[in-house]
Image (cartoon, helix red, strand yellow):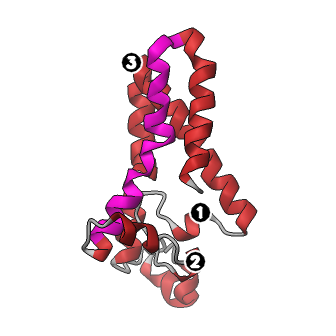
Amino acid sequence: MDLRFHFLASGVLAIILYPFFGLSSLLVFIGGYFVDLDHYLYSAITTRSFSLKKGYMFYKTPWKKRKFVLHIFHTVEIWTTILILSIFYKEAAIIGAGLVLHMSMDFFDGYRLGYSVGDIRATSIIEWIIKRNKITINPLPSHLQMKLGNEGRIF
């Protein structure tokens, strides 16, 4: 999704939260907008260039032609960390609200464009490692694996 929409939606949410949290409501921008810094990090590592232009062009490639990518701030491990921190710190809860908004927008955009976000981007760091290294996890005992073949595999 275009960064402008994430910025605008985060601004609206910050305005809504302002009467309750004051200037702390601006933390929504960390979860709602700046979380997309991982897109730039991934493109910089992949293209071996810190060029913003190359990073921008990297993501202009249609989703269906791209490899399965890791956007580390979009993973369940980060979500879980923010959720746990939210129990103890209101600031983390505000960041989490921005992240929920951001991810909702990403999933809606994927639905609108006809793809599943989970098919093009790892939802977990562990999932990315498994798929990248082509690790197969077979939960069935070996005597059943022979009868079922590859049908029993999870990944």
- Judged from this view, the residue extending furthest toward the front is 53
Left-right relation of 13 to 137 = right
| Label at residue 62 | 2
Q: Would you call the spot at circle 1 few (<14 residues within 10 Å), some (14-19), or many (20 or more)?
A: some
Considering only order in the chain, which callout, 3 or 2, is on the residue closer to the N terminus?
A: 2
Q: Main secondary structure of the magenta part?
A: helix
Q: What amino acid is found at the position of numbered circle 1 in the picture? A: Val
Find disc 1 in the rendering and name its residue: 117
State the image coordinates of residue 107 (x, y, percent, origin top left): 64, 54
**From what the image shows, is residue 106 above or below residue 101?**
below
Q: Quadrant of residue 148?
A: bottom right
| Label at residue 88 | 3
State the image coordinates of residue 20 (x, y, percent, origin top left): 56, 10
| Label at residue 34 | none
Which span of residues is magenta-colored?
Answer: 21-45
Marks 2 & 1, CB-CB < 8 Å contact:
no
Give the number of the mark in front: 1 or 3. 1
